[in-house]
Amino acid sequence: LELETALHKALERDELLLYYQPQIDVQHNRLVGVEALMRWKRGDQIVPPGSFIDMAEETGLIVPMSEWALREAARQAAIWRDAFGFSETIAVNVPARVFMRSDLLSGLRDAVEAHGLPPSTIQLEITENSLREEESRILSTLHALNDIGVQFSVDDFGTGYSNLRRMAELPIAEIKIDRSFVVDLGSGPKPAMLIATIVALARNMGLRVIAEGVETSSQVRELMSLGCHLMQGYYFSRPVPGDQLQAWAIRHL
Ligand code: G
Ligand code: G
Ligand code: MN
Ligand code: NA
């Protein structure tokens, strides 16, 4: 409860931050987007979301936090647009619980319109487990958002309970290969086989595929050879504050 109160105050006092991690098209050495990752500036400490996201989801605080994240991502996109012509996407992580809210659509639209940005600036990352929900509200919100140009990415793919039928019905644009598959590369043939299978699945379904958690040049090479050219991970950049991304991005536009 103490944590909940503290987090509630953090939201009111504007102590939440978004860090951004670049997503690269390795074939062209080009920035294709960034993922926004939440942080909590608690005193001099920068607290990662692992210690507060679950609680935020359980208490429902995740709803105003996600609304804040959408506004903050749009604000940052406009700053980068004005500073160096940024026109790529910012991916925001959104749990199923937030999709059940009918006002996600208007919240997102208001956030981008405040800065004259198209809704397609924001990409939403959902986990494959949230696609299991039988909530028709989630489906209609997904479709309504997609109708205004918002693309969806399935996060942590391959670690949850995939419903391929459901995935084929939904307006999904991208699959993110979970970092655990990438970590295992080089330890026998199985991880590569799994990644090749996910890449083929994505291709057959007409989806982009991006690998996360890429840390070494041998992982980059192996992913390339498996047909995965979009990557994200410490090898390229850690998640960084918005003003630090700029120097990096300018070299990859
Ligand atoms: O950035 P980091 O590696 O610490 O993120 C840890 C976890 O927190 C990841 O699973 C990530 O998806 C989640 N996360 C990060 N930022 C957000 C956010 O803004 N909203 C939600 N719902 N989850 C987030
Ligand atoms: O669940 P989600 O994919 O949104 O979580 C992303 C998390 O992965 C963030 O906490 C981010 O800080 C972390 N991350 C990003 N790149 C790497 C990486 O190369 N290695 C590791 N170990 N973690 C990473
Ligand atoms: Mn993510
Ligand atoms: Na992930």
Image (cartoon, rainbow, N blue to C red):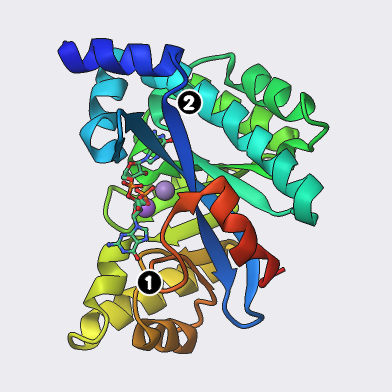
Residue type at the position of mark 1: Val
Q: CA distance from mark 1 to mark 2?
A: 26 Å
Q: Quadrant of the N terminus?
A: top left
Query: Which residue is disc 2 drawn over?
Result: 66
Q: Is residue 125 above or below residue 67?
A: below
Residue type at the position of mark 2: Ser
**For disc 1, does the CB lie below 8 Å from ligand 2?**
yes
Q: Earlier in the sequence, mark 1 or mark 2?
A: 2
Q: Is residue 45 above or below residue 195?
A: above
Coordinates of residue 4 in the picture (x, y in percent):
24, 14
Please name the residue shown 43% across and 54% down the image: 239
The answer to whether residue 252 shows anywhere in this view is yes
Observer-nearest of 52 and 82: 82
Please name the residue shown 72% across and 20% down the image: 110
Please name the residue shown 60% across and 53% down the image: 173
Query: Which residue is disc 1 drawn over?
Result: 214
